[in-house]
Image (cartoon, helix red, strand yellow):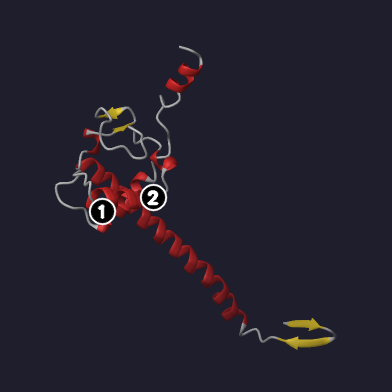
Amino acid sequence: MEFRFANMTHTLKLSLMPLILIALCGAGIVSTNAQAQDAKKVAQQVAAGKKIFDDVNCLLCHVLNGKGGDGKGHPLNNSKEMDGVALRRDPANLRTWLKTHLFEEPRIDMFEQDPTDADIEALVQYLSTLKTPAANAQAPAAAKKAGK
């Protein structure tokens, strides 16, 4: 194989070509595998967070998809509903909020035992999937605006 640069001819031995191709393709495969592993880890954390949410019975006080308590649980960002919480708080803010209110005064006892950092991270990942606002979230504001 020959490459010409400024009237110079360089010959690249064909025996090196497969090694170069493997190196170039290998880099793409490694990043693809890392992304797949990251996605799998996040999916596992989301599932673990959903399980914690259900096991702790967060819907005793909080409302999600129109189901659950009367919404008198300590609200995330002054909302009685968990629907759309990921639109109101980013993961870092959720993490800080949970740690602050679970471990510092005034402490909110939502768990029988203090959750681990892994539990909190799983909850953050799950809550970060709740991006759909409640179906009735806009209805009261629209009705009020219309004078009803």
Mark 2 element type: helix
* Residue topped by disc 1: 119
Identity of the amino acid at label 1?
Answer: Asp
- Residue at image x 36%, y 48%? 94
Where residue 136 appears, as percent x and y from the top left, is 40, 24
**In the picture shown, does residue 66 fall above or below 17?**
above
**Residue 20 got which mark?**
none
**Which one is in front, 28 or 119?**
119
Badge 1 density bin: few <14, some 14–19, many ≥20, Cα 10 Å = some
Q: Classify 108 as above or below 31.
A: above
**Mark 2 closeness class: few <14, some 14–19, many ≥20 residues within 10 Å:** few
Label annotation for residue 93: 2
On screen, residue 84 versus residue 101, left or right, reads right
> Can residue 48 be seen?
no
Choose between 123 and 98: the one closer to the eye.
Answer: 98
Quarter holding the N terminus?
Answer: bottom right
| Quadrant of res 2 | bottom right
Given residues 109 and 123, the one toward you in this image is 109
Mark closer to the observer (1, 2): 2
Image quadrant containing the C terminus: top left
Which residue lies most toward the top here? 148
Between the residue at mark 1 and the residue at mark 2, the CA separation in whole angstroms equals 16 Å
